[in-house]
Amino acid sequence: MFGEGLLTGMGVTWKHFWGKKETFCYPEEKLPMTERFRGGHLVLDHKKCIACSLCSLACPNQAIKLKIVPDAKKKRHMQSYVHLVGRCLYCNLCVEACNMHALAWDKNYAISTWHKEEMEDELVTAEGLAYFHETMEKAKAEAEEEAKAKAEAEAQKAEGGDA
Ligand code: SF4
Ligand code: SF4
């Protein structure tokens, strides 16, 4: 029949016009990613991180650069955590290696850029850096306090020995 194909096509259009929408307005709208989606930027929870370096050692492509500083009590702290996005394979080995569950993906898949320098993510935020300095100062004060108490105890012991 003449025009049968046209009518069939219009029927399909009509059905989809009133049906469930399969498209969305990207980039204003973004699809929520699944639980196991690996992608976007790495996010570090600075309060959970114990600066053990396991994530960096697990990375097969050397995409993680860390700056770890010991405090006055020899405990390690994360001062800088750089994720080299351009080198990343999104294999998730770093996240799996972290026993403290301090690493996660933000699942924001729209991370393309024109600028190479934007492909190096510093995961230690301003808040994380403030926490780092605060912890270092606290450890220094505690170490000084302990050293003072030890010196006093030794002096008292020496005095007791002289008497
Ligand atoms: S996802 Fe894989 S390649 Fe990327 S930083 Fe983690 S371990 Fe390295
Ligand atoms: S493995 Fe986890 S706790 Fe250890 S340095 Fe990496 S993020 Fe921090």
Image: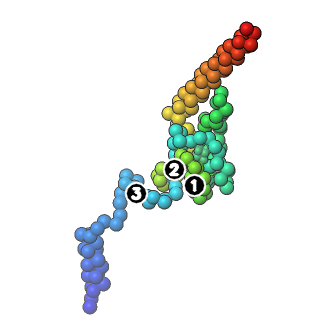
- Please identify, in this view, whether the residue under mark 2 or under mark 1 is nearer the observer: 1
The kind of residue on which mark 1 rests is: Glu
> Residue at position x 62%, y 49% from top?
55
Figure check: 145 above or below 74? above
Which residue matches tag 3?
A: 32
- Residue sitting at 28 percent across and 72 percent down? 16
Question: Observer-nearest residue: 144 or 33?
Answer: 144
Residue 45 position, x and y percent, is 51, 42
Disc nearer the start of the sequence (2/3): 3
- Residue 124, image x and y in percent? 55, 38
Is label 2 within 8 A of ligand 2 (CB to nearest ligand atom)?
no
Residue placed at 67% from the left, 55% from the top? Answer: 60
Identify the residue at the far bottom of this view. 1
In this picture, residue 136 sits left or right of residue 6: right
Can you tell me whether the CB of the residue at mark 1 lies under 8 Å from the nearest atom of ligand 1? no
Between 35 and 159, the one lying in front of the other is: 159
Compare marks 2 and 1 and give the one earlier in the sequence: 1
Residue 152 is at least partly visible in this image: yes
Sequence order check: which comes first, mark 1 or mark 3? 3
Disc ID at residue 104 = 2
Residue 110: in sight, yes or no? Answer: no
Task: Measure the C-alpha gap from mark 2 to mark 3.
Answer: 16 Å
Q: Between tags 2 and 3, which lies in front?
A: 2
**Mark 2–mark 3 contact, CB under 8 Å?**
no
Residue nearest the observer in this picture, 7 or 126: 126
Which amino acid lies under the numbered mark 2 shown in the image of this protein?
Answer: Ala
* Residue lying at the far right of the rendered structure: 162
Residue 22 is left or right of residue 94, and the answer is left
